Every structure is written in C-alpha cells, then in structure tokens.
C-alpha cells in the first residue's frame, strides 16, 4: 500500500479532525449545529466530486442497468478516522464519509497546491561549484550520499537524485477562504 496521500486529502483529514474536536467541545445539542457554521461554508466542492478530481482510491462499481465504472472514495481513510476518534453512531451521522469527502473536494477545488523545493539539488550544485566534479572531496561526499540512499557499493546510480528529491520535498495545500471565494463564480 502506498503511503503517499494527496495533499488535499491530508488537509481534509486535518479539517475533519478539527471538526470532531470542535463538535465534541462545543456542548451543542447536535453535531449538525456545530458543523453549520464552519469556515468551509460557502466554498465550492461536494462529495460527488471525488471521481472527477480522482481523490482517494479507485473502486469498480457495477451498475444494474449498464457497464461497471471506476469511482473514487476516501472510505479507507474514513474508517481509520472513525476508529481513531471512536465516533459514535450519532456522530457518524453528521461527521460522515460524505462530509469527509466534501472537505477533500473543497480542499482540492479551493486550495493552492505547493511542492516544496528539495534542498538536495542546491546542496549538490554548491558542492560542485566549491570542489569541482570528480575531485577527491566530491567523490567522498558523493559516496556518503549514495550509502545514505542504500547503495551497497557507495556508487550513485541513475535516478538516485530523483529518489532524494522525492524523499525530502513535500506536497502541501492551503486554503485561503477569502481568495477562494473571490476566485470562484459558483460560490455565494
């Protein structure tokens, strides 16, 4: 199983955790009262957007009147969250899979995706500028980097620099509600 999680889903998970915490601490009569005025109110996105946005895991759905289709769901994450928070049946009515998927769709539709730059390229280019390619210092440091990446013989192989970049850079997403509302004609 891949450990990679779409940035929008990671943000939606944080938002869901915040909603659970707020609703449990709000002393309101129902969870629905607590959720009615979240910061997400007015942002574009619904749970039905999962397939269009390709968020979550693909599943095959067989239709009674036609061929099967591929749809996307966050059910596997939702099950883990309900167990983590020990959500009651009443809480699950409002803090539902539908609500979680709505948060993910809102994150994807209204968020700004950012991939942080890997420091490896900067480090490696500075190393080349300072010591030159093929010098003993360069070779020694290159061997240390290769061993840190799992090379048994201390040789950097093709693609290892990409592996480093993927390990040390991260994908993030942020929602700025005012900007999101100003940039979407479908929001009221």
Image (cartoon, rainbow, N blue to C red):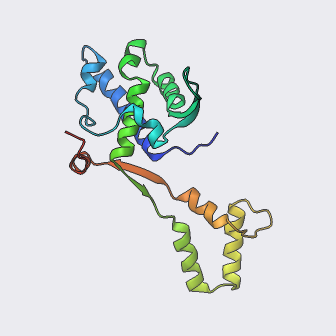
* Residue 17 appears left or right of 145: left
The residue positioned 26% from the left and 32% from the top of the image is 38
Residue 101 left/right relative to 69: left
Residue at 55 percent across and 36 percent down: it is: 57
Q: Is residue 152 left or right of residue 165?
A: right
In the displayed structure, 118 sits above or below 172; it is below
Toward the viewer: 164 or 58?
58
In the rendered image, residue 67, in percent from the top left (x then y), is placed at: 59, 29
Q: Residue at x 71, y 83 (%)?
A: 136
Query: Would residue 62 be found to the left or right of residue 22 on screen?
Result: right
* Residue situated in front as seen by the camera: 157 or 61: 61
Q: Quadrant of the C terminus?
A: top left
Q: Position of residue 72 (x, y in %)?
A: 51, 35
The percent position of residue 184, horizontal first and vertical second, equals 25, 47
Residue drawn at the location 51% of the way across and 37% of the way down: 56
Task: Please determine whether, in this image, residue 15 is positioned above or below residue 21.
Answer: below
In this picture, is 139 found above or below 181? below
Which residue, as the protein is rendered here, is positioned at the far right?
153
């Amino acid at each position: 199983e891949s450990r990679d999680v779409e940035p929008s889903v990671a943000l939606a998970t944080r938002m869901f955790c915040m909603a659970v915490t707020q609703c449990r601490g709000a002393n309101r009569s129902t969870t629905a009262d607590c959720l009615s005025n979240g910061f997400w109110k007015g942002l574009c996105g619904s749970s039905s957007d999962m397939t269009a946005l390709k968020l979550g895991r693909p599943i095959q759905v067989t239709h009674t009147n036609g061929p099967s289709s591929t749809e996307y769901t966050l059910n596997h994450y939702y099950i883990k969250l309900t167990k983590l928070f020990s959500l009651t049946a009443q809480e699950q009515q409002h803090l539902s899979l539908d609500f979680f998927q709505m948060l993910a769709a809102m994150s994807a539709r209204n968020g700004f995706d950012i991939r942080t730059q890997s420091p490896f390229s900067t480090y490696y280019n500075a190393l080349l500028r300072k010591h030159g390619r093929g010098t003993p210092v360069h070779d020694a440091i290159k061997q240390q980097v290769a061993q840190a990446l799992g090379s048994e013989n201390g040789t950097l192989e093709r693609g290892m620099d990409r592996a480093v970049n993927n390990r040390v850079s991260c994908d993030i997403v942020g929602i700025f509600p005012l900007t999101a509302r100003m940039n979407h004609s479908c929001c009221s």
